[in-house]
Amino acid sequence: MELLHNLFAQGQFMPHGYCYLWKPELVGLHVASDALIALSYYSIPATLVYFVQKRKDLPFDWVFLLFGAFIILCGSTHVMEIWTLWHPTYWQAGFLKAVTALVSVVTAVMLIPLVPKALALPSPAQLEAANLALGTEIIDRKRAESEVRMLNAELEERVKVRTQELLDTNLKLKTEISQRQRAEVALQKANDELEIRVISRTTELNQTVEQLQKEIRERQRAEENIRAMQNQIIVQEKLASLGSLTAGIAHEIRNPLNFVNNFAELSVELTQEILEEFENQKDRLEPSELEYLTEVLSDLHQNVNKIKEHGDRAARIVSNMLLHARGEKGEWSVTDINTLLAEAVNLAYHGMRGNDTVFNTTIKTEYDRSIEQLKVVPQDLNRALINILTNACYAVNEKKKEIGDGFVPALSVETTNLDEQIKICIQDNGKGIPDQVLDKIFNPFFTTKPTGVGTGLGLSMAHDIIVQQHRGDIKVETSVGDYTKFIIILPKHASSESTE
């Protein structure tokens, strides 16, 4: 507020005229000079603005406007000099000079980088030389245009001649095309007739080929049936021979075994009667003699009971052998596979126990009860299963002999009901089968057992029964030192009718 008050205050100062002692000639000189200077300064910016407005292409037009502002402010300072002769508003005069100084400094600073650019502008002499060169270029261009027009006229004449030639050529081509089209129509007609003949002949050939293929398929089926029947006859003959041999051996064993069982039973009764008689006559014997005789007879009675027990067990095994050796050759019948497999497990286990009394193994069974009865040859299939199970028992028993008490023999028997098949899995934790002999185990007379222990016919016969006779499949999964797993696949609709 004080600054604004001082800006317009006059009481503290005296007018500038007092400095001139108010001499009219001196005051008039300063007033006239300052007035003329101010008018000149005001006219120059007007001229510059007019010049800039008329010359729109003028480079650096802003510098002219900046000069105009600077000159107007300079003129205003001279007007303020006239004013302060009678009015001492020196604050306003100083403020005006400060603004003039600011604009003048800005103008001076802006001119410094502008000078090189202004010096780079072409001079009038350079512009005149450029105009002269441009005029020469225009003359040359007009001369070239004249030559181009002459060439265009010549080219148009040539085009007319060439166009006429093309028209004549086009007329000839139309004539040739018309002739070619007529030829193509005739050729298409011939092709259509030929295609009709080819289609007719192809149809006849396809019918002939289909008839031949049908006859070939029928002949192949007939040959497959013949081969299957031959293989089945061979397997049945093998099994019949083995059945006869088994039956003969069983009959030969059964007769002395019956004597053993009968006399063992009589011996049990006799020892029991003697023990009872000793009990009645104990008063007549010395106590020490009675005790000794009673102990001997008790041991004898126990031994005879063991003979009778194992004789009965041997009789059951022989009865089962006769049962499975009995029947017609190749007789197909509806059979419960789970029951048949359970009997095979029992026979294989007890057969191994008969050869080695210390043999023992855990047997885990898991039978799928949803499996319906299948039409198979039960005697033959049972022999195949017994052969595989016997090999499994032998494998775990041999591994037990090598490792000792640290090994627990185990068998796993499992059946599974599939869509059109059933699967039987028999797995043991024996020594496994080496890779180098895995593809030979189903060959006749091939065996990994010591001489005199195996004949090499068990797995071969099992393969023939399962694959050739029952149209199934048998696979082996094994890991040396860990396990062996036989996977048997039997079709649900395989029977003797499939080979008729």
Image (tube, grey):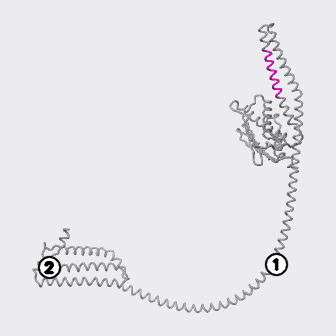
- Give the residue type at disc 2: Trp
Against 377, residue 256 (above or below) is: above
Reading the chain from its start, which is encountered first: label 2 or label 1?
2
Q: Which residues are magenta?
A: 295-313
Against 1, residue 413 (above or below) is: above
At horizontal 81% and vertical 26% (from top left) the residue drawn is 310
Q: Position of residue 372 (x, y in %)?
A: 78, 44
Q: Which label number is shown at residue 492?
A: none
Asked if one can make out residue 273 in the rendered structure from this viewpoint, the answer is yes
Nearest to the observer: residue 5 or residue 108: 5
Question: Which picture quadrant has residue 211?
Answer: bottom right
Between circles 2 and 1, the one closer to the viewer is: 2
Q: Position of residue 50 (x, y in %)?
A: 32, 85
Question: Residue 140: within the magenta?
Answer: no
Quarter of the image that includes the N terminus? bottom left
Nearest to the observer: residue 445 or residue 93: 93
| Number of residues whose C-alpha sits closer than 10 Å to that of mark 2, classed few (under 14), some (14–19) or many (20 or more) | some
Distance between mark 2 and mark 1 Cα atoms: 127 Å
At horizontal 89% and vertical 30% (from top left) the residue drawn is 252
Question: Which picture quadrant has residue 478?
Answer: top right
Q: Secondary structure at mark 1?
A: helix
Nearest to the observer: residue 214 or residue 39: 214
- Give the residue type at disc 1: Ala
Q: Position of residue 54 (x, y in %)?
A: 35, 85
| Number of residues whose C-alpha sits closer than 10 Å to that of mark 1, classed few (under 14), some (14–19) or many (20 or more) | few
Question: Which picture quadrant has residue 196?
Answer: bottom right
What residue did someone put label 1 on? 190
Q: Secondary structure at mark 2?
A: loop
What residue did someone put label 2 on? 86
